[in-house]
Amino acid sequence: MDKVLFGDTATKLIAAYRGPDHSFVTRCKFWIEQLGNKPWVDITTEDIERALAIYMAAGKSKVIRSGKPPNVTRRVVSTGEPLAAATINKLLMAFPSLVKMAKERYLLPRSYQSPTKFVTKQREDNARYIEITREEIDRLILVAGLARWKPLPAIIATAASTGLRLGNLRALKWSDINFERRLVSVPTSKNGSAYSCALSPSALEQLHRLKRAHHQPSDLVFGKHHFVRSYKSAVIDAGLEEKLTCFHLLRHVAASLLSQANANEATVMAQLGQKSPSMARRYSHLSNQHLIDAVSRAWS
């Protein structure tokens, strides 16, 4: 183990990774960049903290695209904004995940302890309750109909009622939608589990409008179109630019509207596909009808 370089092992492990978290590989590459030339045994807690400090100092970044296809160029620039605590913690936890993967393949001894064990995590505030009304979301869906990209109203309505992440929405197939039962089947969530979530009447209406007779069950509902600019324009037109600063916040809208409709925490977690050891027991008994009823109340 003394001569085994971290970078050599980690590079092979991420090449074999087939998990649902596509950002995991990017996080691992950061650790390879920072610690790749050190043997596993020489990596200390101080090395981990030093790398985290570098990551935090860089702050948030964004991709700037210029030119027209096929000559599109991309460059990453810093926004000057600090990173969210959750983002830092996810980067930190990528390292012990690599340790676990290495042990499972007998590349590290079972006695090896991750140097992240004594690194303090950032304190997270995961509560993202958004003060928004059903009428405001309805207005957003309505003005989204002005966009050139015609599926925009449907993807907004679906995201706002189901809380589906963008990756799940892009992978959504027509065969995953049960129009009769008003349910969406999610084959793989961020935590690797399959689950079902309920659609609002508004989302059903928009999806019915979007669906065409020639669509095959295996066809993607929304596809891979880059619609961020269209979404931001619709948000501005609806006067919601201060509340909905990014598309992901529609996931929190789904939770907020359910809470306003007096849905309990277990129902909200089931609708959003969230799972934790302590909460799983509380909502494991919920049937899909609970989700359908709760979403119907929120959007009635």
Image: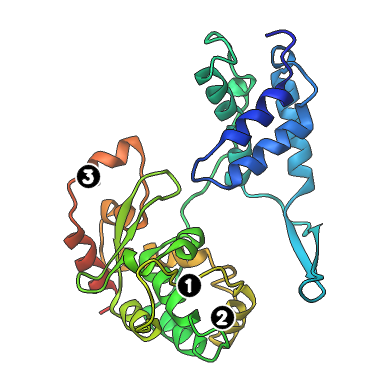
Residue lying at 75% horizontally and 23% vertically, measured from the top left: 47
Task: Give the image location of residue 195, x and y in percent.
Answer: 31, 52
Residue at x 77% of width, y 59% of height: 79
| Residues packed near mark 2 inside 10 Å, few (<14), some (14 to 19) or many (20 plus) | many
Quick one: label 3 or label 2, which is nearer the N terminus?
2
- Provide residue 71's location: percent of width, then percent of height: 82, 70
**Residue annotated with mark 2:** 235
Real-space Cα distance between discs 2 and 1? 19 Å
Q: Is residue 129 above or below residue 49?
A: below
Disc 3 designates what residue? 284
Which amino acid lies under the numbered mark 1 shown in the image of this protein?
Phe
Q: Is residue 110 visible?
A: yes
Image spot of residue 26 (x, y percent): 66, 43
Residue corresponding to mark 1: 222
Q: Position of residue 226 (x, y in %)?
A: 61, 72
Quadrant of residue 159 within the rendered picture:
bottom left
Question: CB under 8 Å between callouts 3 and 1?
Answer: no
Give the number of the mark in front: 2 or 1.
1
Query: Which numbered tag is attached to residue 255?
Result: none
- Could you say whether the residue bearing mark 1 is in a helix, strand or loop? loop
Separation of marks 3 and 1 at Cα, in angstroms: 30 Å
**Label 2: which secondary element:** helix
Tell me the kind of residue under disc 2.
Val
Residue at horizontal 59%, vertical 27%?
98
Q: Give SS at disc 3.
A: loop
Applied colour scheme: rainbow
Check whether the beta carbons of the residues at disc 3 and disc 2 lie within 8 A of each other: no
Q: Disc 2 vs disc 1: Cβ atoms closer than 8 Å?
A: no
